[in-house]
Image: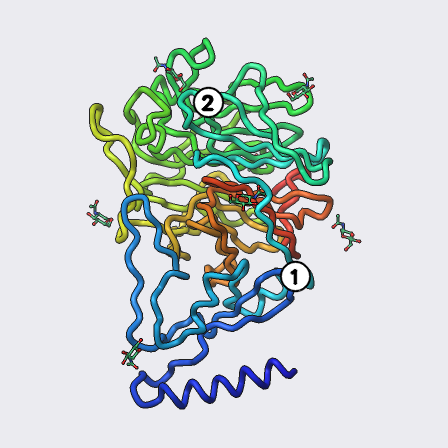
Amino acid sequence: MARLTLISALVVLLRGVSAQSQPPGVTAPLARICGPNTAKVVCIDRYASVMPYHFFRTPSEGSTDISFAQTSVPNDTSFGLVSTADFLVFDQRAYDVLGANPTYDLVFNVSDAVHEAPVYVPSLNKLFVSQLAPPTGYLPQLVIDLNQDPPTLSEFISDPPVYAPNGGTFHNGLIYWGASGGNNSIGGTEQRSGIRTLDPHTNKTTTLLNNYFGFYFNTVDDLFVDATGAVWFTDPQYSWFNRLTDTPPQLKSASYRFDPATGSVTMIDDTLIQPNGIALSPDGNHVYISDTGAETGSIIAGGPPGSPFNQTGVRTVYKYDRVDNGTHITGKRPIWYAQDWVPDGLKVAANGYIVTGTGPGVDVLDPFGVLIVRVQTNFIVQNIAWTGANLTDMWLVGQGGIARVRWSLAGQDLTKPSS
Ligand SMILES: *[C@@H]1O[C@H](CO)[C@@H](O)[C@H](O)[C@H]1NC(C)=O
Ligand SMILES: *[C@@H]1O[C@H](CO)[C@@H](O)[C@H](O)[C@H]1NC(C)=O
Ligand SMILES: *[C@@H]1O[C@H](CO)[C@@H](O)[C@H](O)[C@H]1NC(C)=O
Ligand SMILES: *[C@@H]1O[C@H](CO)[C@@H](O)[C@H](O)[C@H]1NC(C)=O
Ligand SMILES: *[C@@H]1O[C@H](CO)[C@@H](O)[C@H](O)[C@H]1NC(C)=O
Ligand SMILES: *[C@@H]1O[C@H](CO)[C@@H](O)[C@H](O)[C@H]1NC(C)=O
Ligand SMILES: *[C@@H]1O[C@H](CO)[C@@H](O)[C@H](O)[C@H]1NC(C)=O
C-alpha cells in the first residue's frame, strides 16, 4: 500500500515535470518494480507505447543484439529498471503466468555454441539438450539430471551418435530429433540431415528420414509430432551458413509433414525465408511457425559463411489453421514481430500461450500474438522445454547459458496423446 501511494505520487510529480515539453499520453514512470518479490519483476506501463523524447534504440547489427532494455530514454529514468528485470510484465495476465513465487536462475554457464533441442524425458527425469559446433565436429549431446540437487550437466553419446540435433520433441517414449548436419565422415560414418529417434532407455538411435527424393535436406531444424504420429518439421538453410553440412542447399527453404507410417513427405509451406520454430496448439487446430529470415547468408558454394542479422529482415511468428483432415495448414498470418533479435525456438504452453526464444530472453504471447510477459536472460535463448511433475519448470537453453524459470505456466504433456 505504502509503495503504491509513493509510486502514485511519483507519477503525478513526473507528469508535472514533463508536461511542458513531452507529447500528451506519456505515462511516467514507464517502468516500476511490481509483482511477487521472489524474482525481479518489472511492470511496463502500457507497453511503453508513448516514450518521452528524446528516446532512441540503436538497431541490432551483424552478430550484436541491442535489446529493448538498452533503449535510451533519458527523460524517464525509471526505464533503467528494465535491464535489471528477470520478468517484464506487459499485461495483467502475466500474474497468472508468474504465480505467487516465480523464480529465475541461471543454472549452467555453457559455451557460446548454439544449445538446442531441449527434450524432457519424464521417466528418467532428465532433460536432453544438444550442442552444435564449435568445437568443429562436436558429437555428444548434453543431459541434465534433474534427480540431483542441484541438477548436474554431463555429456551423452547415443548409439550410433547423432550429429547436430537442432530441434527435438518427445513422442511415444522416444526423443525425435531434427538432425541438422551432414557429411560423409561424421563419427566414422556418413550422416545427412533428417529425422532421427533416440530411445532414452537403451540409448539406441534410428533414422526415420534422410532425403527428399535423393536430395539432402538443408537443415531439419525444429519439429513436433501430431496425434497420428506425423512429424511436422522446418527445413531452413542454417547448416550451410554455419558449415554443419558440406553441401550447399539443394532445396528451397520450406516446411514439411512426414508420415513415418508410409515414408511420405509432403510440403506444408514454402513461403518463409528461414522457417525455424514450429509448434502445435493444444487443441490441434493451429500450427505456429517462426521465420528467422533476418538471419540469412549466402547459399552459394564458396560464399562467405555466417548469417548476419538484418535489422529490417523477417523475424516473425506466423499462425496457420489446420485443414484437409489435419494434414495441411492455411490462413497464414503474422501474429508477432520479435521485439528482440529473431523468434528461434517456439513452443505452446498447455493453456495455448506461445513461448518463443527471442534474443536474450523469451516472449510469452497469447494465441492472438499479444505480448504478456518477457523473461530476460543474459544469453541468447535458442529453445525451451518444460520439466517437473507439473511441467511448470521451464528451461531456457542457448548460447552461453542454461536457465530455469519456475512459475505457473505449464507445458503440454508430451506423454499424453496429442491432437
Ligand atoms: C530530455 O532530457 C535531456 C537531458 O537528458 C534534455 O536535454 C532534453 O531537453 C529533454 N527533452 C525534453 C523534450 O524534455
Ligand atoms: C556463471 O558465470 C558468471 C560469470 O563468471 C558467474 O558469476 C556465475 O556464478 C556463474 N554461474 C554458474 C551457475 O556457474
Ligand atoms: C564431417 O563433419 C565432421 C563433424 O563436423 C568433421 O569432423 C569432419 O571433418 C567432416 N568431414 C568432412 C569430409 O567434411
Ligand atoms: C545410456 O547412456 C547413459 C549416459 O551415458 C548411461 O548412464 C546409461 O547406462 C546408458 N544406458 C544403456 C542402456 O546403455
Ligand atoms: C533486409 O531485409 C529486407 C526485408 O526482407 C530486404 O528488403 C533487404 O534487402 C535486406 N537487406 C540485406 C542487406 O540483405
Ligand atoms: C482423416 O484422418 C484420420 C486420422 O488420421 C483418418 O483415420 C481418416 O481416415 C482420415 N480421413 C480421410 C478422409 O482421409
Ligand atoms: C504439483 O502441483 C500440486 C498441486 O498444485 C502441488 O501440490 C505439488 O506440490 C506440485 N509439485 C511440484 C513438483 O511442483
In this rendering, position of residue 24 left or right of residue 130: left
The residue that mark 2 highlights is 138
The residue most toward the top is 188
Q: Quadrant of residue 238?
A: top left
Name the spot of residue 54 as percent of width and height, x first. 28, 74
Q: Quadrant of residue 5?
A: bottom right
Going 65% across and 82% down the picture, which residue do you hit? 1
Query: Would you say the beta carbon of the disc 1 residue lies within 8 angstroms of ligand 7?
Result: no
Q: CA distance from mark 1 to mark 2?
A: 38 Å
Vertical position of residue 292 compared to residue 171: above or below: below
| Element assignment for label 1 | loop
Name the amino acid type tagged 1.
Thr
Going 63% across and 64% down the picture, which residue do you hit? 96
The residue that mark 1 highlights is 38
Neighbor class of circle 2 (other Cα within 10 Å; few <14, some 14-19, many 20+) is: some
In this rendering, position of residue 331 left or right of residue 167: left
Query: Would you say the beta carbon of the disc 2 residue lies within 8 angstroms of ligand 3?
Result: yes
Going 50% across and 58% down the picture, which residue do you hit? 374
Q: Is residue 232 visible?
A: no
Looking at the rendered image, the quarter that the C terminus falls into is top right
Name the amino acid type tagged 2.
Tyr
| Number of the label disc, if any, that sits on residue 212 | none
| Element assignment for label 2 | loop
